[in-house]
Amino acid sequence: MSENAALSTEQQAPGALVRELLQAGIAGLASKASRVVDDLSDKLESAAEDAGPMAQAGMAAVEAKSAGRSPVWAALKAGWSAASTEVRIATTLVLLLMIVLAPLALLGLLLTLLILWIREAVSG
Protein backbone atom coordinates (compact mmCIF):
# COMPACT_ATOMS: atom_id res chain seq x y z
CA MET A 1 0.00 0.00 0.00
CA SER A 2 2.82 2.36 0.68
CA GLU A 3 4.03 1.84 -2.91
CA ASN A 4 0.58 2.90 -4.20
CA ALA A 5 0.61 5.95 -1.94
CA ALA A 6 4.09 6.90 -3.20
CA LEU A 7 2.98 6.48 -6.84
CA SER A 8 -0.14 8.60 -6.36
CA THR A 9 1.99 11.36 -4.80
CA GLU A 10 4.40 11.23 -7.74
CA GLN A 11 1.49 11.31 -10.21
CA GLN A 12 0.02 14.39 -8.52
CA ALA A 13 3.31 16.25 -8.65
CA PRO A 14 3.37 16.57 -12.48
CA GLY A 15 -0.28 17.68 -12.46
CA ALA A 16 0.47 20.32 -9.84
CA LEU A 17 3.49 21.44 -11.85
CA VAL A 18 1.40 21.82 -15.00
CA ARG A 19 -1.24 23.75 -13.03
CA GLU A 20 1.39 26.10 -11.63
CA LEU A 21 2.88 26.63 -15.10
CA LEU A 22 -0.55 27.41 -16.53
CA GLN A 23 -1.30 29.84 -13.70
CA ALA A 24 2.04 31.59 -14.20
CA GLY A 25 1.43 31.81 -17.95
CA ILE A 26 -2.05 33.22 -17.47
CA ALA A 27 -0.76 35.75 -14.94
CA GLY A 28 1.96 36.82 -17.40
CA LEU A 29 -0.53 37.22 -20.22
CA ALA A 30 -2.89 39.19 -17.99
CA SER A 31 -0.15 41.58 -16.91
CA LYS A 32 0.95 42.08 -20.53
CA ALA A 33 -2.65 42.72 -21.62
CA SER A 34 -3.02 45.21 -18.77
CA ARG A 35 0.11 47.08 -19.90
CA VAL A 36 -1.15 47.18 -23.49
CA VAL A 37 -4.53 48.53 -22.40
CA ASP A 38 -2.85 51.15 -20.20
CA ASP A 39 -0.63 52.25 -23.11
CA LEU A 40 -3.61 52.53 -25.45
CA SER A 41 -5.57 54.46 -22.85
CA ASP A 42 -2.70 56.91 -22.41
CA LYS A 43 -2.44 57.37 -26.18
CA LEU A 44 -6.18 58.01 -26.48
CA GLU A 45 -6.13 60.54 -23.64
CA SER A 46 -3.20 62.43 -25.14
CA ALA A 47 -4.89 62.41 -28.57
CA ALA A 48 -8.10 63.73 -27.05
CA GLU A 49 -6.26 66.55 -25.31
CA ASP A 50 -4.47 67.59 -28.51
CA ALA A 51 -7.50 67.11 -30.77
CA GLY A 52 -9.95 69.68 -32.02
CA PRO A 53 -13.55 70.22 -30.95
CA MET A 54 -14.94 67.44 -33.14
CA ALA A 55 -12.61 64.80 -31.71
CA GLN A 56 -13.25 66.01 -28.17
CA ALA A 57 -17.00 65.80 -28.80
CA GLY A 58 -16.58 62.26 -30.13
CA MET A 59 -14.53 61.19 -27.12
CA ALA A 60 -17.10 62.71 -24.76
CA ALA A 61 -19.86 60.83 -26.57
CA VAL A 62 -18.01 57.53 -26.25
CA GLU A 63 -17.35 58.14 -22.54
CA ALA A 64 -20.99 59.08 -21.92
CA LYS A 65 -22.25 56.01 -23.78
CA SER A 66 -19.98 53.75 -21.75
CA ALA A 67 -21.27 55.42 -18.57
CA GLY A 68 -24.90 54.92 -19.63
CA ARG A 69 -25.61 58.60 -20.34
CA SER A 70 -26.78 60.33 -23.50
CA PRO A 71 -23.92 60.49 -26.02
CA VAL A 72 -25.62 63.22 -28.06
CA TRP A 73 -25.93 65.60 -25.14
CA ALA A 74 -22.34 64.90 -24.05
CA ALA A 75 -21.04 65.52 -27.58
CA LEU A 76 -22.95 68.79 -27.83
CA LYS A 77 -21.64 70.01 -24.49
CA ALA A 78 -18.05 69.02 -25.27
CA GLY A 79 -18.19 70.51 -28.76
CA TRP A 80 -19.62 73.78 -27.44
CA SER A 81 -17.02 74.07 -24.68
CA ALA A 82 -14.17 73.29 -27.09
CA ALA A 83 -15.36 75.74 -29.75
CA SER A 84 -13.67 79.10 -30.17
CA THR A 85 -15.37 82.36 -29.31
CA GLU A 86 -15.89 83.21 -32.99
CA VAL A 87 -17.66 79.91 -33.62
CA ARG A 88 -19.87 80.41 -30.57
CA ILE A 89 -20.86 83.91 -31.72
CA ALA A 90 -21.56 82.75 -35.27
CA THR A 91 -23.65 79.80 -34.05
CA THR A 92 -25.66 82.03 -31.73
CA LEU A 93 -26.32 84.54 -34.52
CA VAL A 94 -27.41 81.81 -36.94
CA LEU A 95 -29.80 80.36 -34.36
CA LEU A 96 -31.27 83.79 -33.59
CA LEU A 97 -31.66 84.49 -37.31
CA MET A 98 -33.46 81.18 -37.76
CA ILE A 99 -35.81 81.99 -34.88
CA VAL A 100 -36.62 85.38 -36.41
CA LEU A 101 -36.99 84.21 -40.01
CA ALA A 102 -38.83 80.92 -39.44
CA PRO A 103 -42.23 82.60 -38.85
CA LEU A 104 -41.72 84.72 -41.98
CA ALA A 105 -40.99 81.64 -44.06
CA LEU A 106 -44.10 79.95 -42.68
CA LEU A 107 -46.17 83.04 -43.44
CA GLY A 108 -44.82 83.10 -47.01
CA LEU A 109 -45.71 79.43 -47.46
CA LEU A 110 -49.23 79.99 -46.15
CA LEU A 111 -49.75 83.00 -48.43
CA THR A 112 -48.50 81.02 -51.42
CA LEU A 113 -50.89 78.18 -50.64
CA LEU A 114 -53.76 80.65 -50.18
CA ILE A 115 -53.03 82.30 -53.54
CA LEU A 116 -52.85 78.91 -55.26
CA TRP A 117 -56.12 77.85 -53.63
CA ILE A 118 -57.89 81.07 -54.72
CA ARG A 119 -56.47 80.75 -58.24
CA GLU A 120 -57.69 77.17 -58.49
CA ALA A 121 -61.14 78.14 -57.18
CA VAL A 122 -61.49 81.01 -59.66
CA SER A 123 -60.31 79.07 -62.72
CA GLY A 124 -62.02 75.79 -61.79
Image: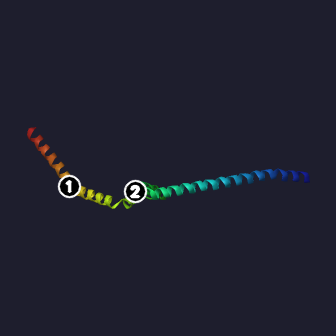
Q: Which of the numbered marks, if any, corresponds to residue 113?
A: none
Residue under label 2: 53
Which quadrant of the structure image shows residue 20? bottom right
Measuring 84% from the left and 52% from the top, which residue is drawn there? 10
Label 2, secondary structure: give it: helix
Residue 95 in percent (x, y) is at: 27, 57
Say if residue 28 shows up in the picture.
Answer: yes
Rendered location of residue 93, percent (x, y): 26, 59
Q: Amino acid at mark 1?
A: Pro
- Mark 2 to mark 1: distance in Å? 32 Å
Point out residue 75 in the picture as x, y percentages from the top left corner.
Answer: 40, 57
The kind of secondary structure element at disc 1 is helix
Of 6 and 91, the residue lying toward us? 91
What residue is rendered at 73% in x and 52% in y?
A: 21
Q: Earlier in the sequence, mark 2 or mark 1?
A: 2
Q: Residues within 10 Å of mark 2 (few under 14, many from 20)?
A: some
Q: Judge the density around disc 1: few (<14), some (14-19), many (≥20) Cα neighbours within 10 Å.
A: few
Can you tell which quarter of the image residue 118 is in?
top left
The amino acid pointed to by label 2 is: Pro
Q: Give me the disc on residue 103.
A: 1
Q: Residue furthest front?
A: 50
**In the image as oriented, which residue stretches furthest toward the left?**
122
Q: Nearer the viewer, mark 2 or mark 1?
A: 2
Residue 94 in the image: x percent, y percent? Answer: 27, 56
Q: Nearer the viewer, residue 61 or 124?
A: 61
Q: Residue 15 or 94: which is nearer the viewer?
A: 94
Residue 64 appears in the figure: no
Report the residue at 20% width, 55% height from top: 103
Query: Considering only vertical position in the picture, is 123 above or below 53?
Result: above
User: Is 2 displayed left or right of 27 in the figure?
Assistant: right
Q: Quadrant of the C terminus?
A: top left
Q: How many marks?
A: 2
